[in-house]
Amino acid sequence: MFDIIRKIGAITRTIQIDSNAQFRDLGLGNNAFIYVIRTCEQPGMFLGELADAVQIDRTTAFRTVKKLVAEGFLRLEDDADDKRLRRVYPAERGLAIYPQLHAYEQHSSDTLLAPLTPAERKQLWALLKKLPS
């Protein structure tokens, strides 16, 4: 059954390589574009929630967020109720490129899933949801 996991890994690596090449000129290599997408889609997440959303360890996520804040893609705000917590929001630059990032993600998804019928897509999603993440 290793073939299934290897196939999922190969798909993931292919998308990562392509996306990193696609967004490197914007300063969003090393999968940093994912942080911008997630933050635009769910503004105001705590730093830890964002790390969980992109499924990256918190230390790496915090470093990447710090870099994206310095480059003007994201911004951090202290939580109104608990000053120990910081929330992540898209900055103007992040909001400006979000449509391009979303279009890329949509195109990648459409291309990858094109061989599947709508019923097969539903079945694939149901099976993938059973796996731990």
Image (tube, rainbow, N blue to C red):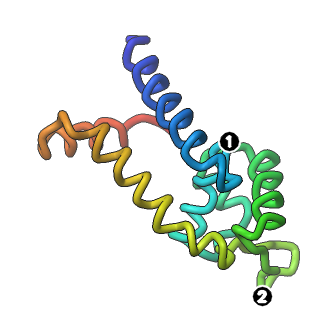
Say which element carries label 2.
Answer: loop
Q: Quadrant of residue 6?
A: top left
Tell me what residue is drawn at x 73 percent, y 74 percent: 87
Circle 2 or circle 1, nearest the eye? 1
Q: Position of residue 121 (x, y in %)?
A: 21, 42
The amino acid at mark 1 is Asn
Mark 1 is surrounded, within 10 Å at the Cα level, by few (under 14), some (14 to 19) or many (20 or more) other residues, namely some
Tell me what residue is drawn at x 28 percent, y 47 percent: 110
Extreme-bottom residue of the structure = 80
Is residue 12 shown left or right of residue 88?
left
Mark 2 and mark 1 in contact? Answer it, CB < 8 Å.
Answer: no
Q: Position of residue 32 (x, y in %)?
A: 66, 51
Q: Determine which of the numbered discs, if any, sits on residue 88 in the image.
A: none
Q: Is residue 82 above or below residue 37?
A: below
Quarter holding the N terminus is top left
Q: Position of residue 119 (x, y in %)?
A: 12, 43
Lower sequence index among marks 2 and 1: 1
- Taking depth in this image into account, of 71 and 42 the one nearest to the observer is 71
- Measured in 3D between alpha carbons, the distance from the residue under mark 2 to the one under mark 1, in whole angstroms, is 32 Å
Extreme-front residue of the structure = 25
Q: Residue under label 2, please give it.
A: 80
Tell me what residue is drawn at x 81 percent, y 72 percent: 85
Q: Position of residue 37 (x, y in %)?
A: 55, 61
The amino acid at mark 2 is Ala
Say which element carries label 1.
Answer: loop
Q: Residue under label 1, please give it.
A: 30
